[in-house]
Image (cartoon, helix red, strand yellow):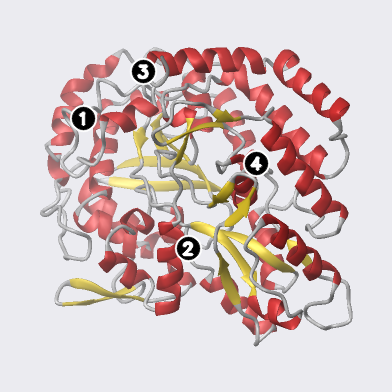
C-alpha cells in the first residue's frame, strides 16, 4: 500500500480547535448524563456538509432508512452534518482489503473508525490520517471530552510522540465464555473450572450426542477465524497469564512476560492441537466469520462460545425457537498452568477515530468533526447514540430514560457507536440496570466486569507497534497459530525451534523486540 503524504500543514488547527471547543453553533444545552432530555442548539443556517465514516462491523445489521434515522436527522439539525456510514461486514481482513483499495486509489473517507490499535498504527505510518497533537490535547479538550487523559494520548503516540486519532472512551471489559447448560445436564457434567475440565466437556459435547438426536452434528467449542483474538482469550489466559500471546506486564511488576515464542504459548497450542485431534473444536474455526459463528450457536451446533460486550440474549432467544429447553450459563474464569485467568483484559484505549488527509483539506470540515466528537459525548447526541429513539428503542419517565425496549430495531446503535457505545457507561449502576432489567443477566454481566484482569499489553505501556516492521510478522504468526492447531505444522522440539527461528530472523521478531524494549525504556517503564 503506497503512502499518501499529508497535504495539510497544521491548517491553522489552533483556530479550528478554538471554535470547535467552544461548541460553535452546535454547543449542547447540557452535558448532563444521557437520559436527561438535554438537546443541542439548532444548526441555524449552516451549509450542510457530508461526513463519510468508514468502519468494520462483524455482522450484518439493518440500518434505519435515512429519512427515519434519528441519529442522522439530529446530527444534520444540530451540526449541519449529513452522516454517511460505509460499513464492511464479515471478516476484518475484507475491510482492510477494501480500505487498502481506497487508499491506493486516493478515494478516502473523511473519518475511519479503528477498532484496534494495530490498524490505527498502520494508517498512521502510511500517513493517510493526520496527526492531532495541535488539534486535540488535554489542555484544550472539547467540553464533553474531559475524560481524555494524557496516558490515553501517550498510548496512541508513535516513536516521534505524534498521535493520529481521537480516542474512544474505554469500556469495562465485558466478555466471557457461555456454555449450553442443558447439554451439561444431559450428559451429567459439571461446569468446567479448569482447562482440563474445559477439554473434557468440549470433547463430550462433540462426541456424546448432547442434544440426543442420534446424529454427530455438534461441536464442543466454536469461534471466529482470528486465532489470537478475543474468542480464544479465555483459553490463552490460563496458559499465558494474559489474554493475548503479546508480551505483557502485571500491575506492580517490571518483568515482561509472554510473547509469540514463549514456552507458555507453545503449551497452549499443544492443548488446542489435542482439542482439534479429539474433535472438540469446530473444524471451521479458522474460516468462520462472526455471522457463521452466530449461526452455529443459534442452530444448536455449538456447546461453548465467547460472548463479547453483552449478555447473549438474542442468541438464546433464537436458539430457543429451535430448542425450547436450551439454557446458557456463564463460565467463570478457568484455572490453568498460569493460575485462574479471566478472558477479560484490563481496560485500555483500543479504539480511535482517524481524520483523513482528504477531510483535513477542508478546515470547516475539521471544525465540524470536532463538534461531532463533542456532540457524541453529551446532551441529545450522546443520548441518541446510546439509547436510540424514544418510543422505539427506549421509554422515558420524568425526562429520563427509564426503560430500554429490547429488539433488533436497536442493533444499528452498535454500528453507530463512534463514542464506544453503552458499555462505556457500565461502571454506572443505573445504566447497568437499564440495560439488564433481568436480574440473572445483570448478575452475569457484573461478574464479567468484575473478572477484569490486572495485566496490560506492552503496547499500552509505551511500546509502538511499527507496521513497517510487524505487518508481515503478524501474518506469519496468525498463519502458524492455525497450522499448529490444525496439526499442519509440528509442535515437537524441532518444529517449534524452526518456527522460533523463522519468527525471529526471517520475519524480524528480534528486531521488533529490540525496538519495543527501547520504547519501553523511553516511556520509563523499564530501566
Q: Which residue is mark 1?
A: 138
Q: Which residue is mark 4?
A: 228
Q: Is residue 327 left or right of residue 11?
A: right
Q: Which residue is mark 3?
A: 524
Q: Look at the numbered discs 3 and 4 and tell me whether their residues touch, using CB distance below 8 Å.
A: no
Number of numbered labels in the structure image: 4
Q: Residue furthest bottom?
A: 324
Q: CA distance from mark 2 to mark 4?
A: 21 Å
Rendering coords of residue 521 (x, y %)? 42, 14
Q: CA distance from mark 3 to mark 1?
A: 21 Å
Q: Which residue is mark 2?
A: 310
Residue under the image location 24 percent in, 47 percent down: 375
Label 1, secondary structure: give it: loop
Front: mark 4 or 1: 4
Q: CA distance from mark 3 to mark 2?
A: 36 Å
Rendering coords of residue 1 (x, y %)? 61, 21
Q: Mark 3 or 2 closer to N-term?
A: 2
Q: Mark 3 or 4 closer to N-term?
A: 4
Label 3, secondary structure: give it: loop
Amino acid at each position: 500500500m503506497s503512502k499518501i503524504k499529508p497535504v495539510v500543514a497544521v491548517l491553522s488547527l489552533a483556530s479550528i480547535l478554538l471554535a470547535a471547543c467552544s461548541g460553535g453553533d452546535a454547543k449542547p444545552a447540557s452535558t448532563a448524563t444521557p437520559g436527561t432530555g438535554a438537546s443541542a442548539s439548532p444548526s441555524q443556517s449552516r451549509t450542510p456538509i457530508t461526513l463519510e465514516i468508514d468502519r468494520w462491523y462483524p455482522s450484518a445489521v439493518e440500518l434505519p432508512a435515512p429519512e427515519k434515522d434519528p441519529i442522522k436527522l439530529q446530527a444534520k439539525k444540530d451540526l449541519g452534518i449529513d452522516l454517511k456510514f460505509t460499513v464492511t461486514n464479515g471478516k476484518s481482513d475484507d475491510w482492510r482489503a477494501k480500505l487498502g483499495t481506497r487508499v491506493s486509489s486516493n478515494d478516502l473517507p473523511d473519518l475511519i473508525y479503528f477498532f484496534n490499535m494495530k490498524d490505527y498504527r498502520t494508517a498512521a505510518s502510511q500517513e493517510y490520517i493526520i496527526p492531532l497533537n495541535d488539534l486535540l490535547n488535554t489542555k484544550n479538550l472539547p467540553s464533553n471530552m474531559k475524560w481524555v487523559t494524557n496516558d490515553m494520548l501517550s498510548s496512541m503516540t508513535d516513536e516521534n510522540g505524534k498521535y493520529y486519532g481521537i480516542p474512544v472512551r474505554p469500556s469495562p471489559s465485558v466478555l466471557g465464555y457461555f456454555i449450553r447448560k442443558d447439554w451439561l445436564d444431559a450428559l451429567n457434567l459439571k461446569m468446567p473450572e479448569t482447562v482440563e475440565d474445559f477439554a473434557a466437556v468440549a470433547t463430550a459435547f462433540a462426541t456424546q450426542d448432547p442434544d440426543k438426536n442420534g446424529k454427530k452434528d455438534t461441536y464442543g467449542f466454536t469461534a471466529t477465524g482470528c486465532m489470537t483474538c478475543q474468542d480464544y482469550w479465555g483459553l490463552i489466559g490460563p496458559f499465558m497469564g494474559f489474554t493475548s500471546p503479546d508480551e505483557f506486564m502485571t500491575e506492580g511488576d517490571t518483568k515482561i512476560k509472554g510473547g509469540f515464542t514463549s514456552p507458555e504459548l507453545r503449551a497452549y497450542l499443544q492443548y488446542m492441537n489435542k482439542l482439534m485431534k479429539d474433535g472438540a473444536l469446530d473444524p471451521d474455526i479458522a474460516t468462520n466469520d462472526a455471522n457463521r459463528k452466530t449461526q452455529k450457536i443459534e442452530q444448536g451446533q455449538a456447546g461453548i462460545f465467547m460472548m463479547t460486550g453483552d449478555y447473549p440474549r438474542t442468541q438464546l432467544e433464537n436458539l430457543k425457537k429451535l430448542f425450547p429447553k436450551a439454557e446458557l450459563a456463564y463460565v467463570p474464569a478457568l484455572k490453568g498452568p498460569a493460575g485462574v485467568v479471566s478472558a477479560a483484559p484490563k481496560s485500555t484505549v483500543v479504539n480511535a477515530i482517524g481524520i483523513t488527509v482528504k477531510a483535513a483539506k477542508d478546515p470547516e470540515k475539521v471544525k465540524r468533526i470536532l463538534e461531532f466528537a463533542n456532540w457524541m459525548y453529551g446532551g441529545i447526541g450522546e443520548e441518541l447514540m446510546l439509547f436510540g429513539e424514544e418510543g422505539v428503542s427506549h421509554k422515558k419517565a420524568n425526562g429520563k430514560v427509564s426503560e430500554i425496549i429490547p429488539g433488533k430495531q436497536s442493533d444499528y446503535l452498535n454500528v453507530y457507536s463512534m463514542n464506544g457505545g453503552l458499555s462505556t457507561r457500565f461502571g454506572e449502576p443505573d445504566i447497568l440496570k437499564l440495560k439488564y432489567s433481568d436480574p440473572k443477566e445483570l448478575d452475569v454481566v457484573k461478574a464479567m466486569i468484575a473478572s477484569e484482569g490486572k495485566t496490560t499489553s506492552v503496547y499500552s505501556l509505551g511500546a509502538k507497534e511499527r507496521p513497517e516492521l510487524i505487518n508481515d510478522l503478524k501474518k506469519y504468526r496468525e498463519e502458524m497459530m492455525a497450522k499448529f492447531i490444525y496439526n499442519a505444522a509440528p509442535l515437537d522440539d524441532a518444529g517449534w525451534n524452526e518456527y522460533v527461528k523463522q519468527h525471529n530472523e526471517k520475519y524480524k521478531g528480534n528486531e521488533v523486540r529490540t525496538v519495543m524494549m527501547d520504547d519501553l525504556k523511553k516511556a520509563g517503564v523499564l530501566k
